[in-house]
Amino acid sequence: MSVFNGNIFEGEFAHDLDSFYVKSVKNVETGSNLTEGQVEELLNYLEDHQGQSTAITINDQMPMMLDAEEVQCLIGELRFIKSHLD
């Protein structure tokens, strides 16, 4: 597994599973496995909300607010993650 340490997401690539394991979001510990399809869905959602703040949820339970700058940062991180899952 290779490690990814972004400003918003931290986690590991599970190449044998073609997924990304999220260990933390904005320094809040979590344990979520994202498939390439889920990364794509989140990326599309955030791209539709560029320039504005939005909320995402961690483990479908804890809402996490992202300001417009954080949305843009996470878009870049997700594009990087997606490119390594292809």
Image: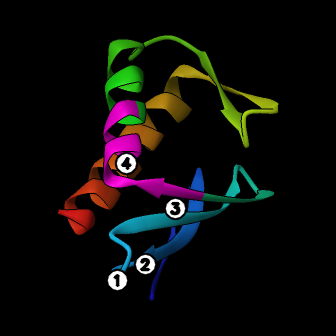
Where 40 falls versus 16 (above or below)? above
Q: Residue 26: image x %, image y %?
A: 70, 49
Nearest the eye: 13 or 35: 35
Pointer 1 residue: 16
User: Given the image, on which type of amino acid does mark 4 rest?
Assistant: Leu
Point out which mark residue 44 bears: none
Residue labelled with disc 4:
78
User: Residue 19: x and y, percent?
Assistant: 40, 65
Front position among marks 1 and 3: 1
Q: Report the amino acid beneath label 2.
A: Ala
- Going by the numbered disc 3, the residue's amino acid type is Gly
Give the distance between the C-alpha atoms of the residues marked 1 and 4, in whole angstroms: 19 Å
Percent x, y of residue 41: 36, 32
Residue 36 in the magenta stretch? The answer is yes
Q: Examine the rendered structure and indicate whether residue 2 appears above or below residue 17.
A: below
Judged from this view, the residue extending furthest toward the front is: 17
Q: Which residues are magenta?
A: 33-41
Q: Residue at x 25, y 68 (%)?
A: 84
In 3D space, how far apart are the residues under numbered discs 2 and 4 (Cα atoms)?
15 Å
Residue count near mark 2 (Cα–Cα under 10 Å), binned few <14, some 14–19, many ≥20:
some
Residue at the spot of label 3: 6
For residue 33, what is the image quadrant? bottom right
Task: Name the residue rendered at 48%, 54% in the picture.
Answer: 34
Mark 1 vs mark 3: which is more N-terminal? 3
Residue annotated with mark 2: 14
Say if the magenta span includes residue 1.
no
Which mark lies nearer to you, 3 or 4?
4
Discs 2/4, front: 2
